[in-house]
Every structure is written in C-alpha cells, then in structure tokens.
Amino acid sequence: MKLSEILNTLKTIQVTGNAELKEIGKITIDSREVENGSLFIAIKGFNTDGHKFIAECINKGASAIVLDNDKGLPDEIFTHASCVKILVEDSRKSLPQISKIFFGNPSAELMLIGITGTKGKTTTAFYIKNIFEFAGLKSGLIGTIANYIGKEQVKTMLTTPQAHTINELLRKMVNANCKVCAMEVSSHSLALERVEGLEFASAIITNITSDHMDYHKTFEHYFNSKKILFDMLSAKAAAIYNIDDEKLFGMMVNTKAKKYSYGTAPEADFRISGIEYDLDGTSFTIEYNKNKYNVSTSLIGKFNAYNATAAFANAVLLGIKPETAVEGIINAPQVPGRFEVVSYKNKKAIIDYSHTADSLQQALSAVHHIVKGERQIVTVFGCGGDRDKTKRPIMGGIAASLSDFVYVTSDNPRTEDTEKIIDDIIPGIKTNNYKRIANREEAIRLSIKESKPDAIILIAGKGHENYQEVNGVRSHFSDKELAERYLKECQN
C-alpha cells in the first residue's frame, strides 16, 4: 500500500519526506520486527518507549516512522535515510486508524461480536463460535486461550491484541471466508484504544466485579473502560447485558444500540430458569418471545448457564434460529481450563482459571453445590505477581472458609518473590486449615496424595495456561497435566 493512502485519512501535525513514493509492506510497533518497507509506530508503553528505537528502525530500512515526541532525532537523519517522518498528536490513537486503513477495514466485512466482563468472556466466546459453526457459518475467535481462524489455531499473548494484530487477524478471517468473529474485549484494550474504529455487530457484558486494580486503580475507571465498548456501538448493533448484575444498567446509558437483557429476572428478554448442574454438566431453560427452550451443556456451573444464554441471545439476535443455537450449545466442547474436570478412580481435580476473589468464590460455591457436604473439598491456589495486591488476603479468606483444606502456593510470580506473595495472602486466613508450599507442582502433588479417596480438588488460578512465569522467564507448566499424573501416581 502506498503511504499516501494512509496519510489521506490520518490526522497529522507534520509530514517530512516524500510520502508519494513510499510503499508500505508492513506496520508494526515492535522495532525487532522492522524490515525494508515497514511503517513503524513509536508508542510509549508501560515498560519502554518506542521512540528510543527510531534510529534502529531507520537503519533497518523502515519506509516511515509515526511518532508523537518530536524531541528525538533531527529531521536530517530521516531525510538522509529517505525515511518519512510523520508527527501526530498521539501515536497510540493513530495505530488503530492506520491499521484499519492498511488492512482494508475488515471488521465491516463480517459479523464482529465483542464480549467483555470480569468473568465468562472466554467461555461465552467459545459458545458463540460453536453456535455459528453449527449453523454452517465459518467463524473466527480472538481471545485469552488462543486465536482461531476457523479451525486453525493462532497463538496469543494478550486477551485482546494490539490494533494492528486485531485488524490483521480479521483480514485473514475474511480472506479465509469467515463470516463471524467472536472477540474477547478486555478493559485494558478498551482503555488503550486497541479496538477503536472496529465495527461491532453486537456486544455482550457478562458481569462486572473488581479486577485489574493494579492498572485501573479505581473501580470507576475499570467500569468506564468496559463501558467504552457499548458507547462505540452503532444504532444497528445489539447490546446484550446480564440483567441480574445491577451494576450493568449504567453500562447501557449512552449506547446507541438496541438493548437486550438476559438472566433469571422475570423481565429479562432472555430469561433463565431451572438451572441444575453436577459433575456431568448443566441443564436449564431459556424463555424468549414466549417460547421455552430446554438447554444442556457439558460445561459445569450456574455461571455457564449464564454464559450459554448470552451466546444464545447473541446468536438469535444476529439471525440464527433458536433451535440451532440450542444445538450449538449442546455440542459445545469443554473450554480448556474453565472448570475442567480431571478424574481417576473416585478422586477428581477441577482445573479452573479463577484468579479473582469473586471467580474463586463462584468456583468453590459450585463445588459445594455439587458435593452437598458429602465429599472433602481441597483448594490449591496462589496469586499472580506484579498484579493487584489488594485481592490476595481476600482470596485467602475465601479459599479457607469454603474449603476443608487449602494449599497456598505460587501462581505466576513474574518479578515478585513467591514467599512474599504468600505472605500477602495468609493474613486473610483466619483458620488453621492451610499449608503454604511455594512450589506449585509440590502443592498439587500433596493436595492429591494427602486428600481423602473421594475428594474434590480445585486447582485454581492458571486454568488453560501451560507455562509458569518466574523473573520474566516462562517455563512449561500445566495444572491439568500435573493433576492427571499425580491422580494416577498417588492412587496406585
């Protein structure tokens, strides 16, 4: 693409160099990815500033640089290297604009569905993808576990990628004949404008509780970040919200989209009733337009009845027959690391991504509902390093009060010391039913070895993740693999 095509619609302060002659073959914010013909957008991040790498990018053959700090290299260096300098007010805000132009506005060529909320984004996205594919529409997914173009899996590092990566993925989906994309939309991505300019056919908010306070600082900022998704919807879109979470009413205030609710409240547009679940799955009824639909899913828990109903509502509102949506839910596979049961003999381990106080409480409440006081409940959990410290003692208290025994261990300590993280957790525990074991593998092994023969062991926090991050280094680590190994070893 000619650089001039990008500049025609990009608001700039100053352009230095001959943009007419420049061809752009790639856009990136990572200097390590720059090659001949690249357009490098210099963004100031949390850990480093892309402006520091402009000289390196020029030397690598970048055709143009977008920047918002003009106090670095003199214009002569750009001119000498025949590199176009593009000064803008805010590089971060320019990235989604440039990405949309470069990749040809792909979100307008398929049904893009945004899913946000503190919990349930991943499961709801998987339900949606499965429903549309069951209906015969090839679908993509952008989310926490992985990105998918139809059945092709693309590795992911962020729940919601940077704007250029999102647009590139959407373009690949369109080129692969995908008609739908379900996308998890994180609060970070909304606050940092990664989804700016995307055209959503619908958006879902599953729930909202305190999370990511290390970044947002206040619940108000977190809430308002989520609200951006609904504020950007067009009048043609559908805004779908959980009516049982009263905090979400404020989320809908300024949206132009038509609003639809789901939940157990009598006035819900998509009303849930008769929720029942055990270790084999969940069943419930959805009432919509005076018709009742009996639904079952292999995914376990009251929260999954809500997630499935959100997906059902979204599909029906976008033209899928209710009966087809029900079949898509019934046939949906287990989502990795989301209340995933691993069994051997009478003992069972549940692998779950619950890493907030509310999600941990919900997971343990679901276990209590299932065992009905007849089996021992053991919990293994830790808290991530370099993240919200205020939730640590709260999670400790929840784990200890809702479990017969708790193994307090590591999660992803990142750059923090695991023992100090555990020190932050312990004050919330007011009972003596716990053991601190910093080594997570050993904690999992002992939880299985020392528990009763028919115990239920909740291994919480990491879910689908197959790594543990210590001091910036990721090593292979899978809760599910370890649970499977030790369930056999400790019971034979």
Image (spheres, rainbow, N blue to C red):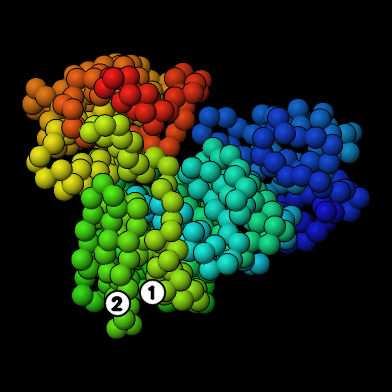
Q: Quadrant of residue 26?
A: top right
Q: Residue 259 carries which label?
A: 1
Q: What element carries label 1?
A: strand
Q: Which mark is residue 65?
A: none
The residue sitting at the right extreme is 21
Residues at marks 1 and 2 touching, judged by CB atoms closer than 8 Å = no
**Which image quarter is the C terminus in?**
top left
Q: Which of 314 and 376 is in front in this view?
A: 376
User: How many numbered callouts?
Assistant: 2
Callout 2, which amino acid?
Lys
Please tell me how crowded label 2 is: few (under 14), some (14-19), or many (20+) other residues with Cα within 10 Å.
some
Name the residue carrying label 2: 292
Report x, y in % for residue 177. Answer: 68, 62
The answer to whether residue 402 shows anywhere in this view is yes
Report x, y in % for residue 294. Answer: 30, 70
The residue at the point 29 percent across, 83 percent down is 290
Report x, y in % for residue 88. Answer: 68, 49
Report x, y in % for residue 220. Answer: 32, 52
Q: In which quarter of the image is residue 331?
A: bottom left
